[in-house]
Amino acid sequence: MPSSVMPTSRLGDGHPSPAAVSTVGLRKSYGDKTVLDGIDLCIPAGSVFALLGPNGAGKTTAVNILSTLISADAGDIRVGGHDLATDPQAVRAAIGVTGQFSAVDGLITGEENMLLMADLHHLSKREGRRAAAELLERFDLVEAAKKPAQTYSGGMKRRLDIAMTLVGNPRIIFLDEPTTGLDPRSRHNMWGIIRELVSDGVTVFLTTQYLDEADELADRIAVLNGGKIVAEGTAEELKRMIPGGHVRLRFSDPAAYQNAAFALREVTRDDEALALQIPSDGSQRELRSILDWLDSAGIEADELTVHTPDLDDVFFALTGADDSAGTPPNQPKEAVR
C-alpha cells in the first residue's frame, strides 16, 4: 500500500475513518526480553486512543517507536499515512510528543520556550511569534509568559509542554502519561485541553496509569500486558468482559423481601440489610425485565442500584494482581479490588 494512502478504521457510528496510526505485527526486544510481541493497532483519525498497562508493560516503548525515537524490530507501521520505516521524516512532521517528563527548559521564560520550539520547526521569526502568542493565550499562560518556567506550577508546566508540542500544528499527538504528578484540578484542566484538541480533529494517543482518565477521555482503550494486547474496545465493552455486574434490591418490608427472595432465582441474600443481589450486565433490557417482574408480582423495592465492573476490575483481571499466581497474561483472572 503506498505511503500516501491511509488505512481505514470504523468509528462507533459505522462510518469509515482514515487510520491515523496503524501497526501490524509490531515487535521490539531488548536482548532476550520481548517488550512488544506482535502488536496490531488501528486508530481512527480525530479520536482518543488510550493504552493501559502495568509498569514495564511496554507503553513508553510503543510511543517511542511510533514517534520515531527508537526503531522496531519488525512490523508494518504507518503514522499519518506514512510508512515509518521508509519515511520517518514525514512521520515526524505529522506528530507531536509530550512525554512523562516535561521538555520545558526551566531556566528560560515560557515565551522563550515557545520561540525556541518555533525555531526548531523552522518558522520565520514573525510566524514563530504569532504561533507563540496564540498558543500562550489558548493555554492561559499569557501572564506567566515572561517568567522563568521553573517558577511555574506542575499544571502550568504541563500546559506549556503541550503548547510547545502544538507549535508545529501536528495532527497526531502522543501523550505519554501527561497527568502524572498533577493535582486533581490540574488533571481535570488537562482533560479539557485534550477534549479541545480532539474537537479540532487532532488524534490523541494517550498512555496512562489513571484508569478514570482513560474511562473519561478515550474512544477506544487497549490493555497491554506481557508484550501483547490482551483486550481492546470501548470502556463499556471492556467492562462487560468482566463478571461481577449485579442489581441490588433493598426492601424495608420484610414480607416483600421474603416474597422476592423466594420468587427470584440466582439471588444472593442479605437478610440483615433486607437486600437481594441479582447477577446482571446492567443492560436496559435486563433492568426492564426486573422492574416488570416486580410490578407483575405486586412487590415494591425501596431501592434499586446497578453495579457494573469498572476499569479497575478490567485492569486487574487482565493484567493480574499477582504474577506469582501463574496466570498467563492473556488469560483473565478473577477481578480483585
Image: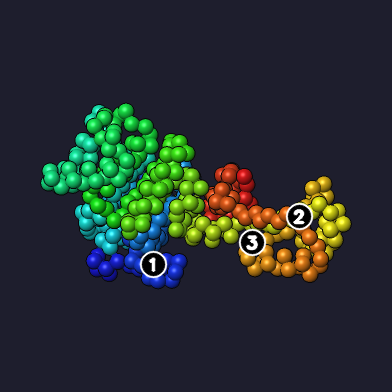
Q: Are marks 3 and 2 in contact (CB under 8 Å)?
A: no
Q: Residue at position x 35%, y 36% from top?
A: 156
| C-beta proximity under 8 Å, tags 1 and 2 | no
**Closer-to-camera residue (324/280):** 280
Tell me if mark 1 has few (under 14), some (14-19) or many (20+) residues whose alpha carbon lies within 10 angstroms of its own.
some
Q: Residue at x 42, y 47 (%)?
A: 191
Marks 1 and 2 sit apart, C-alpha to C-alpha, by 46 Å
Residue 281: numbered disc: 3
- Mark in the foreground, 3 or 2: 2
Question: Local crowd at mark 3 within 10 Å, few (<14), some, or many (≥20)?
Answer: many
- Location of residue 132 (image quadrant): top left
> Can residue 224 be seen?
no
Tell me where residue 118 appears, x and y as whole percent.
Answer: 19, 44
Circle nearer the N terminus (3, 2): 3
- Mark 1 to mark 3: distance in Å? 28 Å
Tell me where residue 276 appears, x and y as whole percent: 77, 55
Location of the N terminus by quadrant is: bottom left
Pointer 2 residue:
302
Q: Give the class, few, some or many, for how many residues have Cα within 10 Å of label 2's Cα (few <14, many ≥20).
A: few
What is the three-letter code of the residue carrying label 1? Ser
Residue type for callout 3: Asp
Q: Which mark is residue 9?
A: 1
